[in-house]
Image (cartoon, rainbow, N blue to C red):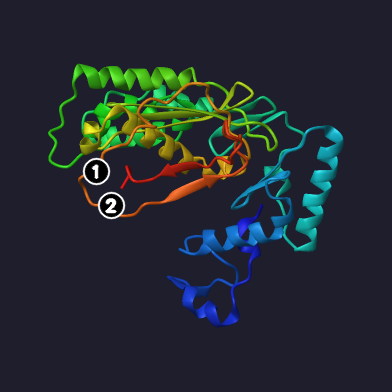
């Protein structure tokens, strides 16, 4: 799209955005680039215009519009709807920057196709060719770029622990052999990253979580296919927790990051074994509780005595 220049500035606000050149003073009558609120205002406009179609067959990011469909007949209908909406709102798209009827498309540094979502090879090549970091700034830059694709790597945060530690204040920069191994492993895993599938409503979600002294890890799946990975390092004081405490932290971490998927679940499969430790009285932590919160999931299987069951996750270990 032409973007910001299609939005008029209120007449009383025009004097605020006057700029001076050697040829004289000029003022924008339309919204220019560079204003701090420009992206927010334009994104809000696009969301309001396409609200009935968002997450049904349209994805919008500022001036990028992605239209997706299951078959060609539906795509024709969806494309006509989007173009008609733009016409009705007097917004115009630049034809030279538009692409139609693609089987796969690059979108926000990802390649999206009917098979799923994968990393953009052009971006991964920059990571693979990254030279050995020589200071904290270069380590931070590498982790920033590689971290953008962390959802494709199982245990990303755990693997990057040693490099992340170099970013801490008052820590001497010392690139060890283990740092080198983590550096090379992340690059290798990103080049071998799986194709992630899009989640589909109405299908069963499966979540696996795990915890160790190295960190927390989890994976979200549907029908045996990976939707996303997530991981997190442990804070120093949490390394003293018991095993069942760490496992509970992993569950809470999983529910928090994927709550928008898991809140719609109405059924939970129960494993046929006694979760030792979790059913035993636990010692009250010595530290002060900041807050105790509980999430209730309805629609659970009945107990052996035919009573309603309630799944309660007490978020007291992450405070």
Give how far across and how far down residue 285 sits, in percent: 24, 43
Location of residue 18 with respect to 149 vertically, above or below? below
Q: Position of residue 212 (x, y in %)?
A: 31, 25
* Crowd class of label 1 (few under 14; some 14 to 19; many from 20; radius 10 Å): few
- The reply to whether callout 2 and callout 1 are in contact (CB within 8 Å) is yes
Q: According to the image, label 2 marks what residue?
A: 289
Q: Residue 58: percent from the left, percent from the top?
A: 70, 46
Real-space CA distance between mark 2 and mark 1, rounded to the nearest whole angstrom: 8 Å
Percent x, y of residue 319? 30, 48
Instruction: Give the label on residue 213, or none.
Output: none
Residue drawn 84% across the image and 33% down it:
72
Left of 1 or right of it: where is 262?
left
Quick one: 67 or 12, which is closer to the camera? Answer: 67
Quadrant hosting residue 45? bottom right
Please state which of residues 258 and 287 is positioned toward the viewer in this rendering: 287
Q: Give the residue at x 15% y 27%.
A: 174
- Residue that label 1 marks: 285
Q: Quadrant of residue 235?
A: top left
- Residue in front for this viewpoint, 87 or 17: 87
């Amino acid at each position: 799209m032409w973007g910001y220049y299609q939005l008029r500035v209120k007449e009383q606000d025009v004097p605020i955005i006057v700029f001076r050149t050697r040829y004289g003073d000029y003022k924008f009558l339309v919204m220019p680039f560079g204003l701090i609120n420009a992206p927010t205002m334009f994104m809000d406009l696009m969301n309001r215009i396409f609200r009935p179609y968002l997450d049904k067959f349209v994805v919008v990011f500022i001036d990028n519009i992605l239209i997706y469909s299951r078959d060609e007949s539906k795509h024709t209908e969806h494309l006509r709807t989007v173009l008609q909406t733009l016409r009705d709102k007097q917004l115009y798209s630049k034809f030279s920057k538009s692409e139609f009827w693609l089987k796969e498309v690059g979108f926000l540094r990802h390649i999206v196709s009917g098979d799923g979502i994968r990393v953009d090879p052009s971006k991964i090549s920059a990571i693979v060719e990254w030279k050995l970091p020589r200071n904290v700034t270069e380590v931070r830059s590498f982790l920033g770029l590689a971290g953008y694709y962390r959802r494709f790597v199982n245990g990303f945060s755990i693997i990057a622990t040693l490099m992340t530690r170099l970013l801490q204040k008052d820590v001497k920069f010392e690139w060890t052999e283990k740092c080198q191994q983590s550096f090379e492993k992340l690059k290798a895993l990103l080049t071998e990253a799986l194709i992630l599938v899009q989640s589909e409503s109405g299908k069963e979600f499966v979540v696996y979580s795990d915890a160790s002294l190295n960190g927390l890890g989890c994976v979200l799946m549907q029908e045996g296919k990976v939707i996303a990975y997530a991981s997190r390092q442990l804070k120093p004081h949490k390394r003293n927790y018991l095993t069942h405490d760490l496992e509970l932290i992993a569950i809470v971490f999983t529910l928090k990051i994927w709550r928008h998927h898991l809140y719609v679940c109405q059924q939970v499969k129960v494993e046929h074994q006694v979760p030792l430790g979790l059913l035993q009285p636990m010692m009250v932590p010595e530290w002060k509780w900041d807050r105790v919160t509980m999430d209730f999931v309805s629609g659970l299987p009945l107990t052996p005595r035919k009573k309603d069951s309630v799944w309660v996750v007490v978020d007291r270990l992450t405070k």
